[in-house]
Image (cartoon, rainbow, N blue to C red):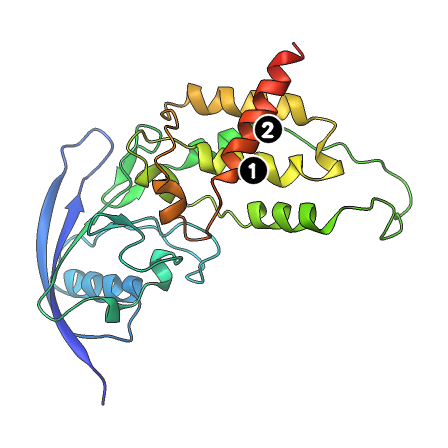
Amino acid sequence: MENTINIKLKVWRQAGPKAKGRFETFELKNISTDSSFLEMLDILNEQLINKGEEPVAFDHDCREGICGMCSLYINGRPHGPDDDVTTCQLHMRKFKDGQTITIEPWRSAGFPVIKDLIVDRGAFDKIIAAGGYVSVNTGGVPDANALPIPKPNADEAMDAASCIGCGACVAACKNGSAMLFVSAKVSQLALLPQGKVEGARRAKNMVAKMDELGFGNCTNTGACEVECPKGISLANIARLNREFLSAKAQD
């Protein structure tokens, strides 16, 4: 027999970046506990549309925990009350019958609200672009072992590369810092031979762009690591600091 719950939603509504926002309250009945959080929002929007009302705008794409677009602040936590999952992987079984669920967009100067629960995360794209390119020799296909990489380095680089750029680290940080994101993107290349040529320039440029876009400073509270759906380690921030200081020393 399917389990269902009745819930109350407090949803942030904001018509546009300059508009004044507010919370609106909705009640949903008989929501399957097997539903994902985004499926629950789909049900809400279907009901609103059937009543001729404006649906709630929220971001999503893959719904498989890969794209990082489902950025919602749920009951005071980025991506909600479960650990190591994105919002699209969160299921309604994590909530209780009769519970009130508060849903907000990311709150950060670097992520301005576009509408309702959607924020502009284009700042992350600009930081990536500031990192620039990686030099690769053209020619024939090299042998698989032409560039030997120690397995610990390869494993760490892959762990850093698992960052999906969702922005939960920024949303969790009291300073709105993007250091965990930037450090992951720097680390995934700094650990590999292919990333060494432009390493110093990359670290300086990405940190400078992060500061320019209004993200705060890191004070090592660790909230970013706790709320990251991919478990990106704080060790990457230490590596970014080393890369940055080394680059500045070369100036």
* Residue at (48, 56) in percent of width and height: 66
Quarter containing the N terminus: bottom left
Seen in the picture, residue 35 relative to 240 is either above or below; the reply is: below
Give the image location of residue 72, x and y in percent: 29, 49
Q: Residues within 10 Å of mark 1 (few under 14, many from 20)?
A: many
Q: Left or right: where does residue 47 sit relative to residue 221?
A: left
What residue would you read off at disc 1? 185
238 or 28: nearer the viewer: 238
Please tell me which residue lies in front, 211 or 237.
Answer: 237
Q: Amino acid at mark 2?
A: Gly
Which residue appears farthest toward the bottom when viewing the image? 1
Residue 85 percent across, percent down from the top left: 39, 58
The residue under the point 85% across, 53% down is 144
The residue that label 2 is drawn on is 131
The residue sitting at 47% across, 38% down in the picture is 181
- The residue depicted at 67 percent of the width and 31 percent of the height is 133
Q: Nearer the viewer, residue 34 or 176?
A: 176
Q: Report whether residue 167 is seen.
A: no
Q: Amino acid at mark 1?
A: Lys
Say whether residue 182 is visible: yes
Residue 99 image position (x, y, % from top left): 11, 63
Position above or below: 116 against 34: above
Q: Is disc 1 in contact with disc 2, using a CB cutoff of under 8 Å?
A: yes
Question: What residue occupies the far top of the structure in this picture?
Answer: 251
